[in-house]
Structure formats: structure tokens, C-alpha cells
Amino acid sequence: MGYAYNGKILRVDLTNRKIGIEEYDEQWYRTYVGGRGFNAYFLLKEVGKGVDALDPENRLIFSLGPITGAAVSGNGRSSVGAKSPLTGGYGEGDVGGFFGAELKHAGFDAIVVQGKADKPVYLWVHDGEAEIRDASHLWGLNTLESQEKIREELGDKGIRTAQIGPAGEKMVRFACVINDLKHSAGRTGMGAVMGSKNLKAVAARGHGGPQWAEPEVIRNRARWLAENLREVAGGMYDYGTSGGVPDLQEHGGLPTRNFQEGRFEHFAEISGQKMAETILEARENCYACVVRCKRAVRVDELGVIPTYGGPEYETIGSLGSLLGIGDLKAIALGNQKCNAYGIDTIGVGTTIAWAMECYERGILTKADTDGIDLRFGNAEAMLQMIEKIARRDGFGNLLAEGCYRASKEIGRGSEQYAMHVKGQEFPMHEPRIKQGLGLGYSVSPTGADHVHNIHDTTMTEGPSMVAVRKLGVLRPLAFNDLGPDKVRYFTYSVNWASMGNCDGLCCFLPYQFDGTTEIINAVTGWGTNMWELMKIGERANTLCRAFNARMGFTAKDDTLPERFFHDFEQKLPTTAALKKEEWEAAKKMYYVAMGWDENGVPLPDKLRELALGWAVES
């Protein structure tokens, strides 16, 4: 094997308690690269249409990228993939931290898990070896308790874990996989799949790993960022991802009370700036990263400890403004509960927001909510519902199904207040100030997702246009432009973002196109360029789409909630409702640009052009 990879994929059959190792050549690695590419490859190859997401024959895939584990800032990303219990289609949770680097150093590029253990187990992966171990004593424990017991049992405090909490064990549909207690592979319900297999955790420890093609280039890039941190990433260091709350407030893009509003009267009290002044105890990092954008907070009177990290922007939005809650300390406690139980903060917040709006509109009453006054702004109700959802207790059992299924169960017009695409709850980004992002929500293979997407603010006049011009977009584009130029930029950007979900590099780092290409070449020695990397992203995106087509998805699933086709009551110059005709036309343009048919299904010739001829008959 060449550089950047170990050349080994770990295969685990939990039903038969068998472990094996598969090896692939460099051409295979360069074609699928890692992360999303690996996930989609194995899912399309091995998971048939009739396999339910919680069936033993679903695959659960822990995938690394070529950059994962290299000593350069932003390298810590890894991916978890499976058929999603939320959407019934392609599922993927991407996550930072230290686990991915540890797994790479332990000698593997991915783990493919199938089957179901007859009792709880965990997987112990270390220096080229793996074993299935009993986890009966860990079942029911929160993530901190479980990690401590695993480390004690194996006699090594340096072990890194990817695990589920009680929510994953009970197959809450938006349960997540938690790495190192504070890093979440949050989206699409990967924790529920892990729980369905009776797999409590994967523990990794390694002292080796692959060689890198140009170590000096990697060192120089790491040195450059360390020396220029204040200039290029100072805001992320100071305030983390929630430092942008005031700007979103100003432009009307801070999701408030279930996306009914775009401004929140208590925005300053939940911002990254306020966190830095009050409850912040430490700025933390992922493996080998100098940016230190991660928050670690302490609230002694509520029992909030820095061991579980602290809320990032998505959590500030989903447990804060989206629920009308302006209590930063309560949000921090909600974040800790989610990390301890293994719950996606976006999924749980958006689902609770649906319930709160239904409660205020009289669709739900205290008789439905177990006596809880589920009004917007009630922080105690939010905390109670997280507990009930994690344990599938009472009304929490319904909400554990996610807002889409819960609204179908309740009916009575509640469906219109469920903010989801394909069953996955909305992240904390507002399509009425980022209409290209709204298009991205609708066509995403995972349902509503903000990471493999665009943010229209990158196309406004200013420094951001320097990077955009690399894609041939030479003039600024308005936030509410959904014409051909926006669709062209969207297509290129989404393919680039999809590549980012393959390579293991964090999207928050200021490398842009040239820096990313330099780093990939430095770790792999491929001598690649931006064009090939764009095709890698397009290939991965197309594989995801082909998997969804197998599962019966059509253009009718590429939709948006009706709410976003209507203006806010307090409309601003920076906000506007999407227009259905323009949005539909943009979708069709995107399908054509991607080589898909009118139902969004990849055409055979496009698959062949992407070296995916084997998928034509899949």
C-alpha cells in the first residue's frame, strides 16, 4: 500500500462473532478515498432494498479519510455510515475528536460491521488486531461511565472510544455515536443502528499507522496555521461556532420558535461571546489542531462539567432560540444530557420545537405531554423531554421517533409544523436568508443537512468571493437568487463539500481549495488537482443518490416544509420566502447538471463516466 492508508479494512460479523481483514489496492482507495465514499460503496454493494435500517443485515461503517491522523490542523474527522432509521435512505454522521486518528494509528482505514450480537458487546481494536468483548456490564450506562469502565478494564487511559449511550440502546431514531464524550456523529440516527446490533462501543488504541508522502509539507502547513491563527481563525478560537449568533440575529437568520421567526430577543444571552464571558472553562481541540474551537463549560449549580465539552452553535440554536430559551446555563445542561445519553442535539431540539408549537396551538395538551407545560421558553420542559426521549418514557417514546413520524402519529394538522426533509430534522440555518442552502436541504441524500451544502453568504461581495471565483463564479449572487448561476455554484460546491466528507479534513479550517489540495497531495503523494477532487466528491454524492434510488426515493422526496415558502411576519431586506416555481426549476437544473433523470436518479452513462459502471445494475 502507498501513503496515507493502512490498506486494511476490518470486517466484523457480530452474529457469528467473526472478525476478518480485507485489503484493497491503491486504485480502489483513490476512487472512493474514504468517509462518505467508503460508506456509500459498502452500502450500495451490500444492503438490499428490503433491509430495514434496524435489521441485522444493515451495515454500520466507521470510515476514515486519507488526512485522518496526519499531524495537521483539521485532520480529526471521521464518518459513520449506515441505512438511516430516520430517513430509510443513505445515512451518515461526520465527527471530529480523537477516535478517528486513533483508529488510523491502530492500523485500519475502516470498520464494516454486520449482524447482531446475542448480547451487548464492544469491539476492541489495537495495533492491527481486534476482538469482540462482552459489554453486558456497560449496557445502560451513560457515555462517561462506559468509557471509564472500558479504560479501566483494558488498563489504558489513552484509549479512545466511539460509543452509544442509553438512547442508542433504546434505538431513539436520532440517537448518535459519541466520540470521546464530546464529539458527536450526530445526524441520521447512526446510534440507533449501533444499538440495534447490541454494539455498545468501539475502543481503539494504536502506536503505528501509515506513512505520509511529504512530511515536511505537512509540518509547514501546520506551522503556517499556528503562526497565523489570530488572522485566519481567531474568531473560531475566541468564540467557537456560536460566535456567529449576533450576525445571524442582525440578518434575521437565527431560527426561533420552530422557524416561525428569524430573530430572538435573548440572542446576546446565548451567544459565543456570552459563553466566553461566563461559563467557558477551556478551549479544546481535535487531534493535532491548533484552532481549539471546541468549548468546555462548567455550571456548578447545575452539575455541568467540562468533561462533556460544551454547546456548539447547532446546540445553541436547537436547544436555545429554536425553543425560545435564553438561558445559557440550561442549554449547557441540555447539551451535557445529550452527550451523556447519546442524542443528536439538532434532532432532539427540532422535535421538541415541533411539540412546543403543537402545544401552543392546542393540538397537544398536558394530557399528551405527561403533564409537562411544553411552551416555548420553558427550559425545564426542554430538560425533562430530553430525559424522557432518551429513556423512551411516556410522551418521550413518541418524540423518540423524530418529528416526522410523531406528526404522522398525532395528525390533526401537526404535520405542517414538523421541520424536516426526508424525515431528518432541520439544522439551525434558515433558508429564507440562504435560499441555495434551502435547495441543498431538499436534494441532500441524508435529508436536511447544513454541512454538505452551501451557505449563500459566501457569494456576497467581499473576501469570500476570492475563493468562489476559483469555481468560475465571477460576480456576487444575491441570497434569494436561485437562477442558473446559483445552481451552477451550488452544484460545484456540493460536490466539493461531498469530497470533504471523504477526505477527513474539517470544513471549518481556512484552507480553501488550494490548501486542501496541497494537504491531500502531501499525505497521499497522488499529485492530484482540484478537478479530480471535485470528481471524487461527485462520485460519492452520486453513490449516495443511487443508494436512495434503490430504496425507492424519487423527486417527490426532494422537498421542503411549506413554512419556508412564506415570509416572516417581520420581513427584513435580508430575508425572503422561497418561490416554489424558482425552487422547482432550480431542482430540475441541478438534476441535469448532475447527470440524473427527472426523478433525481443517476443515469447509466453518468455512472459509467464516474467509474461506477458496476452500479448500473445494482
Image (tube, rainbow, N blue to C red):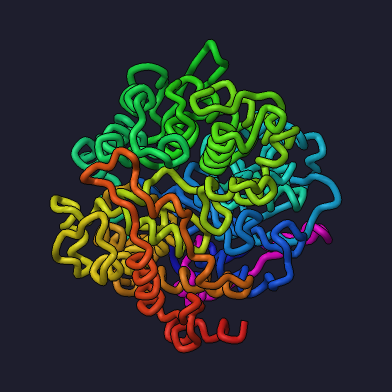
Task: Identify the image quadrant of residue 553.
Answer: bottom right
Say if 505 sits above or below 51 in the image.
above
Q: Is residue 482 left or right of residue 319?
A: left
Estimate the x, y position of residue 304 in percent, counting from the top left.
54, 20
For the point 72% across and 47% down, which residue is it? 195
For this orientation, the residue located farthest to the top is: 301
For the point 46% across and 31% down, which residue is it? 311
Q: Is residue 618 left or right of residue 518?
A: right
Residues shaded magenta: 11-36
Say if 589 sits above or below 385 in the image.
below
In front here: 563 or 317? Answer: 563
The mark total stands at 0
For the point 45% across and 74% down, which residue is it? 539
Say if 104 sits above or below 586 in the image.
above
In front here: 207 or 431? Answer: 431
Q: Is residue 556 left or right of residue 112?
A: left
Q: Is residue 125 left or right of residue 585?
A: right
